[in-house]
Amino acid sequence: MLERRRLAVKGHALGRKALRELGPIITPDTILRWYRELIAEKYDGSEQRKMGRPRTPDELQDLVTRMARENPGWGYTRIRDALGNLGYELARTTIRSILKEHGIDSAPERSKRTTWKAFLRAHWPAIAACDFFTVEALTWSGLTRFYVLFAIALQTRHVDRGSRSMSK
């Protein structure tokens, strides 16, 4: 309604002669069409829309990064398949983007750099700790120095009681 009023005011200012010259160029239908297009642009919601695809939920991103950290040999396809078993569907490229965003390398690079925690967990049954020390003890023959080599299996906490005495 306001636009029609403005057009009427402008048309009155131009005068009848100028309106006749513009008549074939601009018809009332054209003016109304322009008005409908302006209204359509105003209310189409394009300013509210965000660009691109929706983000992957944070819980799913956490699950992908956890799988990658706990299984350094797993590539994008293996992580995708494991997620499929849990009922999630992600593309390999989405998994790659998530890992890149969190600073996690691809599987070949991850598997080259094993953490101490992963190394110890993998080799725990074969790891032993040892210490070598001396003890001064008073025996029937006087003060004696004993050399002690102490070894313990870390997984079982088993100590070998083999003993051998070397005194000086």
Image (tube, rainbow, N blue to C red):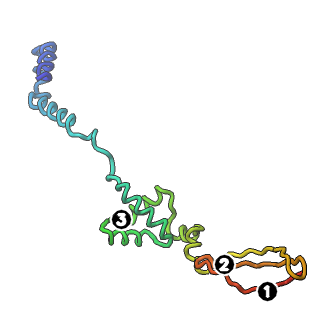
Q: Amino acid at mark 2?
A: Ile
Q: Nearer the viewer, residue 33 or 145?
A: 145
Q: Quadrant of residue 10?
A: top left
Label pair 3/1, CB-CB below 8 angstroms:
no
Which is closer to the viewer, label 3 or label 1?
Answer: 1
What residue is at 90 percent from the left and 82 percent from the top?
141
Q: Amino acid at mark 3?
A: Ala
Which is closer to the viewer, label 3 or label 2?
Answer: 2
**Dot 2: element:** strand
Q: Nearer the viewer, residue 67 or 3?
A: 67
Q: Where, quadrant-wise, is the C terminus in this rendering? A: bottom right
Q: Is residue 141 above or below residue 116?
A: below
Q: Amino acid at mark 1?
A: Arg
What residue is at 21 percent from the left and 36 percent from the top?
41
Q: Which residue is mark 1?
A: 164
Q: Which residue is mark 3?
A: 91
**Dot 3: element:** loop
Residue 144 placement, left or right of 89 = right
Residue 69 locus on image (x, y percent):
49, 65
Q: Is residue 20 above or below residue 161?
A: above
What residue is at 82 percent from the left and 84 percent from the top?
165
Q: Earlier in the sequence, mark 1 or mark 2?
A: 2
Q: Is residue 8 above or below residue 67?
A: above
Mark 2 Cα within 10 Å, few/some/many (few <14, many 20+)?
some
Q: Earlier in the sequence, mark 3 or mark 1?
A: 3
Q: Which residue is mark 2?
A: 152
Q: Quadrant of residue 161?
A: bottom right
Residue 31 locus on image (x, y percent):
13, 29
